[in-house]
């Protein structure tokens, strides 16, 4: 579904991603793992072309997308949930969802406000509150819901478990499992294995912007050395 | 009481087009972060277009139709400006786009002159609304009543658009985080274009709507700019209810000012603005601005270094060529180069503030014109010796800058810029309206230099020495520990504070120093011309300096001087043509698009690319 081939990305002169390659198969949940600063967020931004890739290719359903602007990539069906959440703090919950709205797409699940409010009951209660009035966990759910309003077939989730309470983490895991069961493909970034173990099928580990491991999660579980070498405890 | 009510009604009617124009500007700024200097020009086109349409369309339907169509036409003009001029420069460093909009002002001025001629046009009366109605015995023009009724409808329609439609939601979302809006699949380019066109249409509508009250003339673009900026800033950049409230406050105050304090009408508005910003730094309904939050940070600056030998030699050679000018140049060229040198010093003083201090002042003419006026007032009122007046002028300007800076530096970014503009306008209006003391519109004349400087050649040398020394001192200070502290404060306030720099004090001193140097340029100016008029304090003069600094290149030390020399030179050449503004405007737009790093910065990059200059390592 998503192929990333030898991409290189820079911030000014700082070379952050180095010849990074991996695939995300259709219907799978792939965990992008690595320590803080390894380049996970940059990888997600490079797929979206928020950070433009200097070389290499990014293919989505066979189509080269690294020459497209972010909004066209989103329109093709890639939903991006940034790590710092970036809810529109002056907009209400409902308005945040409206921004994310895209017409239904063939071959992917169609989400509506009602369905999403069923999935995230806390948000339903706060539908007319402004983004800035929400708790961290509610904001995290809102960003996911907002992205789902675009009816994506692939979702990029950047560290969904970061800085939220354990109950919310639990809820996130359920949501991801549900997305998978609905047929969505997910690329998820995490610093450690705990969360990924519960939801992911495949894992990519990156270190200093280069890939150091790519395989199934089962294999990774069988190799504690790799985990200890490249991941946070 | 009756009179009071009548005054308020007139004020509310006057608020009508001010509100329309201001909320257009506010919308555009909110979404695109562009301070659209050309907004007054769009308002002017609206008035002229409305006028022409009213000539051909008959009756009441024709009249109101003309207003609506004028709005649409101006919306279209805005669309073209956005696509042709602004799109190529969105990625440029913050505020650089305003230079492009300044180019647009010049182009539109000449186009309007070509199409509608230099005569002021008297606005047609609205059919069916010619007379007055008596309200509590006071006569109120019927057209005012019509405006009173129309404006709330337009305001509500806009409010509906912004709060209730998806487009409005997107606009508000983009005001907060446009990158995220893009990542959610919204094509921002079209959103920007749409908002720019809508904001322009509102300006055009405002222009056409005020025709029966004010007509159309070629000065209305700059004349509306100051009140509109004031309204937007008082209301809070990007806030429509704020703009509405502020337009009403300003207009009503203005009506009362005319009746009770006719000498202070112009000053009043700025006093209100200053008071509001002192209490609420981001306007009545504004949101705090965080620098760089909109993803518009330019590339990092190169470390500055002492001039290389090559540069020193070029500068020395240039100075030699100038010093020998009296041997081969005409009288005219001496006068011209004197003007250019003075302007270079003026621009260099602003460049110091902008480049080294990161403080964008929209009102630097206050200190340039201020210096000129200090000298002229001393000569006129106390018969001061020229030398003494010349010496005191920069101190007067510096002192003014220190006190104004003290107030303005509570704010940052666009609000700081606007506040400096307001103060500059305040000084301008003081000078303009306090005729007994300052000569008002007639200026101050017979301000000649001392006997030993009377000769054009001698004064040329005097200017050459003073301006060059001034520029070298500015440069020197930029390299001194003070300059480093100033840059540290610019790059990271927190880090600078952590290393023990009192950023506020450093900035204040820089503001005062830049004002001092601006005043020095003003003093040179007044004695070279023998007179000074309020237009040396005008917005247009501040913009002149701002434009050349941006065009020369903010991030290179030579930018201000090279920009000033280059553009003043070109202007002096072009000014002989009837439509020189058009050419100058197109040139500015061209430079902005072709050389987003300014002339000096782009030259340097170009030379690096072809290998003439070594790329500096970071
Ligand atoms: N906006 C930026 N400008 C410059 N460097 C950045 C920026 N964002 C991230 N980096 C750097 O890029 C590297 C990778 O960062 P990131 O992709 O955020 O890592 P992760 O998400 O894995 O923690 C880090 O060294 C970080 O310091
Ligand atoms: Mg990250």
Image: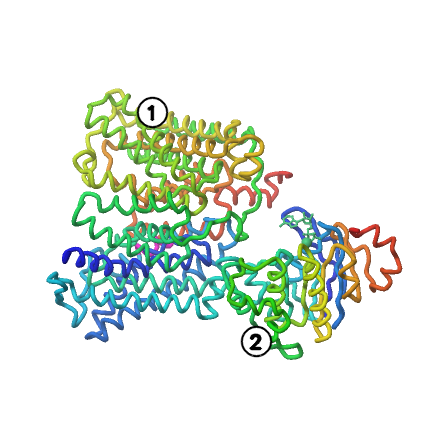
Q: Quadrant of ligand 2?
A: bottom right
User: What stretch of residues is rendered in magenta?
Assistant: B103-110
User: Considering depth in this image, is A76 or A57 the residue closer to the camera?
Assistant: A76
Report the residue at 23% width, 75% height from top.
B61
**Looking at the image, is mark 2 or mark 1 nearer the viewer?**
2
Q: Residue at x 35, y 67 (%)?
A: B156
Asked which secondary structure carries label 2, the reply is: loop
Quarter of the figure with the C terminus of chain B: top right
Q: Quadrant of the N terminus of chain B?
A: bottom left
At 75% from the left edge and 60% from the top edge, which residue is drawn? A195
Mark 2 lies within 8 Å of ligand 2 (Cβ measured): no
Q: Quadrant of residue B197?
A: bottom left
Nearer-the-camera pick, B408 or A47: B408
Instruction: Please state if B263 lies on the left or on the right of A212 as rendered.
Output: left
Q: Which residue is mark 1?
A: B462
Secondary structure under badge 1?
A: helix
Q: Decide if residue A67 is on the left or right side of residue B448.
A: right
Q: Is residue B614 magenta?
A: no
In the image, residue A176 above or below residue B430 = below
Q: Chain of mark 2?
A: A
Percent from the top left, x then y, of residue B601? 52, 42
x and y, in percent, of residue B513 in the image = 41, 30
**Mark 2 — residue?**
A103
From this viewpoint, which residue is outermost toward the bottom? A106
Chain of the residue under the numbered disc 1 shown in the image: B
Q: Is residue B328 visible?
A: no
Give the farthest residue toward the left.
Answer: B137
Relative to B483, say whether B172 is above or below.
Answer: below
Residue A2 percent across, percent down from the top left: 72, 67
């Amino acid at each position: 579904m998503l192929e990333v081939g030898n991409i290189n990305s820079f911030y000014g002169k700082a070379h952050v991603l180095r010849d990074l390659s991996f695939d995300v198969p259709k219907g799978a949940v792939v965990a992008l793992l690595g320590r803080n600063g390894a380049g996970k967020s940059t990888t997600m931004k490079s797929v979206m072309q928020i950070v433009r890739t200097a070389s290499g290719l990014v293919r989505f359903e066979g189509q080269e997308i690294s020459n497209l602007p972010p909004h066209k990539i989103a329109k093709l069906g890639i939903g991006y949930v940034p790590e710092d959440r970036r809810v529109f703090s002056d907009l209400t919950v409902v308005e945040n969802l409206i921004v994310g709205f895209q017409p239904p797409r063939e071959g992917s699940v169609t989400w509506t406000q009602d369905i999403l409010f069923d999935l995230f009951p806390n948000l339903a209660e706060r539908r007319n509150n402004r983004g800035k009035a929400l708790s961290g966990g509610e904001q995290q759910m809102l960003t996911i819901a907002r992205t789902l309003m675009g009816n994506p077939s692939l979702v990029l989730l950047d560290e969904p478990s970061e800085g939220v309470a354990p109950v919310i983490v639990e809820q996130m895991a359920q949501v991801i499992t549900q997305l998978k069961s609905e047929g969505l493909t997910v690329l998820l970034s995490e610093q450690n294995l705990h969360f990924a173990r519960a939801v992911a099928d495949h894992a990519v580990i990156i270190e200093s912007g280069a890939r150091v491991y790519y395989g199934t999660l089962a294999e990774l579980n069988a190799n504690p050395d790799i985990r200890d070498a490249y991941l946070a405890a | 009481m009756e009179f009071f009510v009548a005054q308020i009604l007139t004020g509310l009617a006057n608020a009508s087009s001010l509100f329309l124009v201001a909320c257009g500007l506010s919308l555009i700024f909110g979404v695109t972060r562009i301070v659209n200097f050309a907004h007054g020009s769009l308002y002017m086109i609206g008035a002229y277009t409305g006028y022409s349409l009213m000539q051909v369309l008959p009756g009441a339907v024709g009249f109101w139709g003309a207003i609506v169509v004028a709005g649409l036409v101006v919306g279209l003009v805005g669309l073209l400006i956005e696509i042709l001029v602004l799109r190529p420069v969105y990625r440029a460093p913050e505020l650089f786009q305003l230079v492009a909009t300044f180019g647009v002002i010049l182009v539109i001025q000449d186009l309007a002159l070509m199409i509608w001629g230099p005569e002021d046009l008297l606005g047609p009366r609205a059919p069916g609304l010619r007379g007055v109605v008596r309200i509590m015995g006071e006569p109120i023009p019927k057209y005012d009543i019509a405006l009173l009724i129309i404006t709330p409808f337009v305001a509500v329609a806009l409010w509906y658009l912004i709060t209730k439609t998806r487009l409005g939601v997107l606009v508000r979302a983009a005001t907060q985080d446009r990158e995220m809006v893009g990542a959610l699949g919204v094509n921002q380019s079209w959103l920007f274009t749409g908002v720019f066109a809508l904001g322009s249409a509102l300006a055009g509508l405002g222009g056409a709507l005020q025709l029966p009250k004010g007509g159309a003339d070629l000065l209305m673009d700059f004349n509306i700019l100051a009140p509109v900026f004031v309204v937007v800033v008082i209301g809070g950049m990007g806030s429509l209810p704020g703009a509405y409230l502020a337009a009403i406050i300003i207009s009503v105050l203005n009506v009362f000012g005319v009746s009770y304090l006719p000498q202070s009408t112009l000053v009043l508005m700025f006093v209100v603005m200053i008071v509001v910003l002192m209490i609420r730094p981001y306007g009545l309904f504004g949101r705090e601005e965080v620098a760089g939050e909109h993803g518009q940070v330019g590339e990092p600056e190169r470390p500055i270094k002492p001039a290389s030998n090559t540069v020193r030699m070029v500068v020395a050679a240039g100075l030699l060529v100038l010093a020998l000018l009296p041997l081969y140049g005409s009288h005219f060229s001496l006068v011209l180069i004197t003007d250019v040198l003075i302007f270079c010093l003026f621009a260099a003083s602003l460049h110091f503030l902008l480049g080294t201090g990161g403080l964008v002042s929209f009102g630097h003419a206050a200190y340039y014109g201020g210096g000129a006026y200090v000298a002229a007032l001393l000569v006129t009122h106390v018969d001061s010796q020229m030398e003494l007046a010349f010496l005191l002028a920069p101190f007067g300007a510096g002192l003014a800058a220190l006190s104004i800076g003290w107030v303005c530096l509570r704010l940052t970014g666009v609000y700081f810029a606007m506040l400096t503009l307001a103060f500059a306008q305040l000084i301008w209006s003081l000078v303009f309206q306090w005729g007994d003391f300052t000569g008002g519109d007639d200026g101050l004349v017979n301000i000649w230099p001392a006997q030993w400087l009377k000769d054009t050649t001698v004064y040329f040398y005097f200017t050459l020495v003073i301006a060059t020394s001034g520029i070298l001192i500015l440069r020197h200070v930029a390299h001194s520990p003070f300059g480093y502290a100033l840059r540290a404060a610019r790059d990271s306030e927190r880090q600078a504070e952590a290393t023990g720099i009192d950023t506020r004090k450093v900035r204040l001193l820089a503001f005062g120093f830049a004002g001092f140097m601006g005043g020095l340029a003003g003093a040179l100016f007044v004695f070279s011309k023998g007179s000074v008029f309020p237009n040396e304090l005008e917005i247009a003069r501040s913009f002149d300096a701002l434009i050349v600094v941006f065009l020369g290149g903010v991030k290179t030390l030579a930018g201000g001087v090279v920009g000033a020399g280059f553009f003043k030179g070109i202007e002096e050449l072009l000014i002989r043509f009837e439509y020189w503004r058009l050419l100058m405007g197109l040139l500015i737009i061209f430079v902005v698009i072709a050389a987003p790093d300014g002339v000096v910065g782009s030259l340097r990059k170009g030379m690096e690319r072809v290998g003439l200059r070594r790329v500096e390592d970071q």
